[in-house]
Every structure is written in C-alpha cells, then in structure tokens.
Image (cartoon, grey):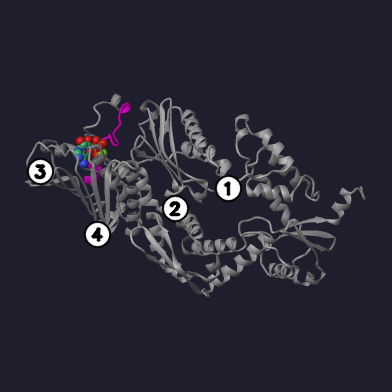
C-alpha cells in the first residue's frame, strides 16, 4: 500500500476544476458573470476554435487591484461573501470563489486589469495554476481575461470535448442567454473573427429578442408583469401561434441567472395547456425576482438547477401570471364540443376556469372519441372499457392508446391486406370526409384516409431518400430563416446530409439563412413553419440519431404536411390508396404510431342489435 499523503494545492485545484469547468462554455459563463458582477456596462467575448484554443472576455468594470490579483486566483477567494451567512443574501452571480482558480489550473491564463484609481494596469500570466509573469502595462479601465488551450494539461478531459463547431455553439447559446438576462449590459460576441451578436445595453429586452430570435417571434409577444408576495415577474411570452416542438424556447431567469427548473417549466406549460396542441411548447423570456430566502442557493455552481424553499408557491404565482395574460387575449377560435364532452369537461375542470374560451380537445382525444364511442366496438370489450374510463377520468392517460394498438394486431388475423383478398373488398363509401368503409369477410374495416395516406407517402419517401433518388427544386424567392446558434451549428454540421436530401441552405447575413432549394416532395408545401418545425424536432435529439434521423424526420414532415387538410377523395383514389397500403410491411399504423385501420365484425353488430344473444 502506498503512504497516505495530502494532495498539493495544484492537484486539488485541478480536481476541483472538473466540477466547475466542463467545457469552453463554462469558462465563458464564469468570466461573463464575473464581468457583470464587476459592474461592467460593455463586455466583449471572443472565441476561436469553439473556445478550446482561445477565449477572451473584455469588460469595462471595476478592475482588480494589483495587490489582490494573486488572491483572485486562489481557491475559495472571493470579494463577494465573507461567511456562510452571507450566502443567503447574495445577489451577485458567482460567489464561491472557485472559478478563476479552477480555470487557471487547467489552461494558460492571461489577465490584464486596471482599477480607476491607478494610471497603469497589470498584465499577469499563469500556466497550469502557476504564476508565470507579472508586469505593469498601459491598459484601459476594466479587465481582460484570455484563456488559452483549455485542458492542455489534462488530456483526458480534453478528449471529452466535442468538435469546435459544437463547443462553439454551446458558447454562442450561453452568451445569448446572458445577453437576454442582462439587457442593461452591452454584449458583443465574436467567433472566429466574425461578429455573431451585438446588444446595445439599452435595457430593452424586446430588442435583444429581435436580434436573437428574429422578426416573427418578436411580432407575437405578450408582455408579462406581475408582482405577488416574494416573487415578481417581468418579460414576454409568445402567442400560441409561435409554439415550438421542444422546450428550447422556454427561457426564464431567476435573479438574473439563467436556469432550468422542472417546476417553472411545468407552471408555464400548465398555463398554456388550454391554448396549445399536445407536444407543443411556448416561447417565453421571463425574469423572475425572488427573495433570496425562498431559494436554496447552496446548489452546485455549474448546475443550472435551482431549488426553491416553497416550490408550490412559486409554481402558482408563475402559472397564474401567464394564464392571466393568455386568458385576456382572443387567441383561440371557439370550438364547439359535443354534449358528452362538454359534460366531461365541466365535471373535471375546476370552477374558476368556467369563463375560459371553450377548450379545443387535443386531437388525439377527439379522434379516440370518434373512433371508439362507448361500446361501439364490442369485439374489444377491455379496450373500450379502458378508453372511456381513461377518457373521462384522466384525459392525459396514455394507457388506452396502447391497449388499442395491441388489440389492433389481433384484428387482422384475417388477411384483409393480402393482395389475394383484393378483389373481394367491397368499398362502401366515405364517412365524415375522412374514413373509408370496406366490407370484407364478415368484417367492417374503417380506414383513416389521412393516416393511410401518410403511411404510404412516408414509406415511399423513405425509400427514395435511402436510394438517394432525391431531386430538388428551386424556391424563389428563397425562404429566409432566423436561426439560433444551436440550429446554426446543426445546419453546418449536417450540411452534407441536408444537401443530399435536396436542401441548399446559405448564410444570408447575421443569423439569417436562405433556403434556396428543397427536396421535390417538399416543394408544394415548403414554408417557413415547416422548416422551423423540422429544425426544432432535430435539435431536440439529433445526438441519438445522426444523419438517419434527419432523413426520417424529413420524410415524416413531408408526408404529414402533404396530407394536411380534408381533401375529399374519389372512390377510385381510395381504392388506389388501399392498394398501396397493401404493399407495405406494416400497414396498420401511420408513422406517428396512430392506427390506420380499425374493424368491427358482423357478429358484434348483430349482437349490438340483439339479433343474436
Ligand atoms: P467569485 O466570482 O465566486 O467571487 P472567482 O474565482 O470567479 O470567484 O473570482 C474571484 C474574485 O476575483 C472575485 O470575487 C472578484 O473580486 C475578482 N474578479 C474576477 N473577475 C473579475 C472582473 N472581471 N473584474 C473585477 N474583478 C474580478
Ligand atoms: Mg466568479
């Protein structure tokens, strides 16, 4: 056994650095927060190679006094708190005194700083936590920190870094969030010698939202202003028309700090629920000021999770503030519900929501209710019982869908879809402009035209995408998209794949990109919303799927959009559709997993009419 020894300070710092500094964006976060804490009104962030080889943060804040410079790089040295009690009063962004020591332990750091009281500044260099040089130089008031070659002395950590493009996009995102949370500070971001972001520091949040998110979002904002007990909320929320497919656009800051919190997300989504389709998420940009007593500040500095002393209260205040704003706007057209659904709704909703506009039932539920009215399909007694119970008791219950799907497969023991059965199909007609009724072998089959169409198109598109038989068409004028830095990185990283699929996307100045060509099958429906939706779903979980996922999503979106709207179909077209459906490997569910076909037997009908017992 080796002897027990106390680790030297340098090693301790290197280990500690792992907790605070994970990647270039964590360095930028710490340096930006320090600059803001130092009272800067203008900050420039510059990175090269995604911040791996070079990060420079320059501020015009108060500077560091010459005699305090070495202290600033000591672990647990901070000018912001004096004792553990102070932790509860902190209003500054960082206070654990760990950042500079951690950064200096794993990189080459150069500090240039001057306080207003002095005529000259100091240039101070460190490498791997050791002082390298110190000299007096001419410098503007404020502080510049340069961090070179991150993790140069910890190769294992360095190996964990992603490509410069990915790391750079993390930094870009972080700078955006800080700019949004501090409209009073002018922030400039330069990446590989290109200006990526500039905010003027004029206190106007909407200006920054415009710079980062573009025209369309800015045009659809509602202001929020609420103050209750220990919580005050200001900022903007998006109208439901600019809803997205993931939570990336739900932003909120607590006491100036960008955080993630399932409580706050939940509160936001709860407020939006009556106005939103399922799986859609709103745009929000909210500043919450919460009394420090209500926060658990002793959370890990790099974790963006925050704990509340009284989460329930914060939840309610936020939800009510947002709901209040939404409720007073005419956002949703009246949707008439059937008597039955109205009863259910009124029975399940608390009283005070009575004055709301009628709630559009989520699409899925409406469809379920249409397809499986109580006891309509007695061949699946369990499923039906589950459905109606699930529906009235808890509309969100997912279980019934699964039950039905399982049952679904049993229904097709008789080979309706075998090509040989084809000329024994009796096409009876169309119901509600949507469902085709087919009689075959003592069964009534009900085919959802949209789901079937979507399925057929999807398989076709996937096949042609796989065989690279894709051709593209020019969109004129091009579609202009304003992209977030994450989306920008996505498009760059997968440029090749997008090109193969038939997308030609070019930089169009600043955050804007011009889409000049799209795949053939997207042409008739290519619109801004469609492409935004595509990028949204991709940026959500691209890491898992890579280029295959892009292909799949393009196919999915193109066919989903292609069959939107109730076009009526002639009987001949319906026959053709059923024919095409026959050829598929799994014709029973559309690409989103909803059934394409359900059935009811003659026997069950006769039982219903009490012709047999
Ligand atoms: P913390 O921010 O938690 O106090 P840091 O390690 O980030 O710890 O910084 C240590 C100290 O160095 C700070 O408390 C502050 O006094 C000083 N400091 C760091 N960056 C700046 C800056 N940009 N301008 C002025 N002072 C700074
Ligand atoms: Mg700090």
Residue drawn at (33%, 55%) of the image: 167
Circle 4 SS class: loop
Q: Position of residue 46 (x, y in %)?
A: 24, 53
Asked whether the residues under the numbered discs 2 and 4 touch, taking CB atoms below 8 Å apart as contact, a structural biologist would say no
Badge 2 or badge 1: first in the primary sequence: 2
Question: How many numbered dots are placed on residues in this image?
Answer: 4
Residue drawn at (56%, 41%) of the image: 273
Mark 1–mark 3 Cα distance, whole angstroms, equals 58 Å
The segment highlighted magenta reads: 87-105
Q: Position of residue 518 (x, y in %)?
A: 48, 68
Mark 1–mark 4 Cα distance, whole angstroms, equals 42 Å
Q: Position of residue 399 (x, y in %)?
A: 66, 45
Circle 2 SS class: helix
Circle 1 SS class: loop
Mark 2–mark 1 Cα distance, whole angstroms, equals 20 Å
Q: Where's the N terminus, which quadrant?
A: top left
Indicate whether residue 98 is drawn in magenta.
Answer: yes
Q: Which residue is mark 3?
A: 121
Q: Point out the quarter of the image occupied by ligand 1.
A: top left
Task: Point out which mark residue 277 bears.
Answer: 1
């Amino acid at each position: 056994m080796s002897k027990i020894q106390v680790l030297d300070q340098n090693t301790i710092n290197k280990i500690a650095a792992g907790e605070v500094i994970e990647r270039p964006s964590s360095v930028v976060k710490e340096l930006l927060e320090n600059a803001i804490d130092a009272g800067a009104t203008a900050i420039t962030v510059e990175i090269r190679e995604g911040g791996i080889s070079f990060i420079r943060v320059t501020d015009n804040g108060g500077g560091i006094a010459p005699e305090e410079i070495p202290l600033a790089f000591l672990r647990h040295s901070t000018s912001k708190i004096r004792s553990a009690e102070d932790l509860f009063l902190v209003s500054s962004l960082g206070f654990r005194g760990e950042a500079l020591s951690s950064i200096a332990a794993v990189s080459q750091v150069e500090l240039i700083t001057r306080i207003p009281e002095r005529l000259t500044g100091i240039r101070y260099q460190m490498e791997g936590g050791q002082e390298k040089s110190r000299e007096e130089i001419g410098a503007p008031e404020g502080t510049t920190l340069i961090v070179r070659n991150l993790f140069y002395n910890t190769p294992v950590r360095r190996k964990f870094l992603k490509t410069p493009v990915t790391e750079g996009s993390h930094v870009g995102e972080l700078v955006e969030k800080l700019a949004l949370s501090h409209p009073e500070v002018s922030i400039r971001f330069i990446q590989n010698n290109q200006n990526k972001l500039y905010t003027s520091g004029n206190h106007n949040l909407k200006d920054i939202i415009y710079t980062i998110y573009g025209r369309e979002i800015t045009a659809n904002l509602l202001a929020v202003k609420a103050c209750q007990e220990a919580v005050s909320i200001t900022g903007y929320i998006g109208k439901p028309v600019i809803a997205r497919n993931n939570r990336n656009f739900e932003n909120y800051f607590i006491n100036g700090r960008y955080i993630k919190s399932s409580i706050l997300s939940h509160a936001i989504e709860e407020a939006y629920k009556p106005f939103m389709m399922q799986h859609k998420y709103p745009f929000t940009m909210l500043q919450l000021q919460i009394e420090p007593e209500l926060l658990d500040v002793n959370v890990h500095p790099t974790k963006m999770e925050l704990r509340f002393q009284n989460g329930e209260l914060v939840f309610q205040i936020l939800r009510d503030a947002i709901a209040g704003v939404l409720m007073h706007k005419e956002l949703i057209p009246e949707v008439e519900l059937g008597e039955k659904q109205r009863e259910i709704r009124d029975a399940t909703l608390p009283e005070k929501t009575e004055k709301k506009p009628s709630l559009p039932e989520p699409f899925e539920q409406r469809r379920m209710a249409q397809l499986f009215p109580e006891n309509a399909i007695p061949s699946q007694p369990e499923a039906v019982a589950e459905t109606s119970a699930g529906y009235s008791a808890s509309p969100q219950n997912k279980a019934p869908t699964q039950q039905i799907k399982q049952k679904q497969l049993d229904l097709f023991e008789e080979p309706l879809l075998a090509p040989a059965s084809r000329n024994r199909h009796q096409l009876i007609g169309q119901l509600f402009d949507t469902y085709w009724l087919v009689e075959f072998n003592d069964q009534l089959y009900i085919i959802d035209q949209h789901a079937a169409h979507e399925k057929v198109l999807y398989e076709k598109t996937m096949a042609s995408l796989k065989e690279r038989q894709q051709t593209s068409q020019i969109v004129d004028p091009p579609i202009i998209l304003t992209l977030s830095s994450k989306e920008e990185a996505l498009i760059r990283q997968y440029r090749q794949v997008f090109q193969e699929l038939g997308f030609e996307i070019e930089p169009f100045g600043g955050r804007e990109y011009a889409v000049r060509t799209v795949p053939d099958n997207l042409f008739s429906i290519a619109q801004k919303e469609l492409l935004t939706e595509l990028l949204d779903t991709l940026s959500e979980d691209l890491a898992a799927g890579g280029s295959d996922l892009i292909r799949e999503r393009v196919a999915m979106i193109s066919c989903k959009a292609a069959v939107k709207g109730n076009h009526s179909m002639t009987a001949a077209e319906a026959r053709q559709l059923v024919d095409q459906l026959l050829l598929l490997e799994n014709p029973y569910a559309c690409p989103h997993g909803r059934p394409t076909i359900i059935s009811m037997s003659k026997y069950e009908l006769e039982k219903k009419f009490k012709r047999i017992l």
